[in-house]
Image: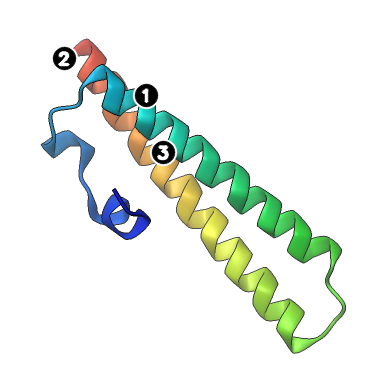
């Protein structure tokens, strides 16, 4: 599944197997880690230029998106385990 597909995918609408749940946790963790690294890189390489401000804004937006996705997955998976 591509990232764009994941953004619109509703975990509550799909039968999650244990393997798929593990894959989602891994993908979510990797996306968060990557987004955090990009934000840190943007912060520490900020030189006041317009390009560095754009890089920071883009990295911040990706981290926000990754965090929102992680919350969505975290809310969906426990319901599946308990349901």
Q: Where residue 8 sits in the image (x, y, percent)?
A: 24, 55
Residue carrying label 3:
71
- Looking at marks 1 and 2 on the same chain, the residue that comes earlier in the sequence is marked by 1
Spatial distance from mark 1 to mark 3, Cα to Cα? Answer: 15 Å
Q: Where residue 7 sits in the image (x, y, percent)?
A: 31, 54
Asked where in the image residue 79 lies, by quadrant, the reply is top left
Secondary structure type for disc 1: helix
Q: What residue do we see at 75% from left, 55% from top?
A: 40
Q: Where residue 18 sits in the image (x, y, percent)?
A: 27, 18
Q: Are marks 1 and 3 in contact (CB under 8 Å)?
A: no
Residue carrying label 2:
83
Q: Nearer the viewer, mark 1 or mark 3?
A: 1
Spatial distance from mark 2 to mark 3, Cα to Cα? Answer: 18 Å
* Badge count: 3
Q: Are marks 2 and 3 in contact (CB under 8 Å)?
A: no
- Looking at marks 2 and 3 on the same chain, the residue that comes earlier in the sequence is marked by 3
Residue 78 vs residue 51, the one in the foreground:
51
Residue 39, relative to residue 66: is it above or below?
Answer: below
Spatial distance from mark 1 to mark 2, Cα to Cα? Answer: 17 Å
Q: What residue do we see at 75% from left, 65% from top?
A: 42
Residue carrying label 1:
22
């Amino acid at each position: 599944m591509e990232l764009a597909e994941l953004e619109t995918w509703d975990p509550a609408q799909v039968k999650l197997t244990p393997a798929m749940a593990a894959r989602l946790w891994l993908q979510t963790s990797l996306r968060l880690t990557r987004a955090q690294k990009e934000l840190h890189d943007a912060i520490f390489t900020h030189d006041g230029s317009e390009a560095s401000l754009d890089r920071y804004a883009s990295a911040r937006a990706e981290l926000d998106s990754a965090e929102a996705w992680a919350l969505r997955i975290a809310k969906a998976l426990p319901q599946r385990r308990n349901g």
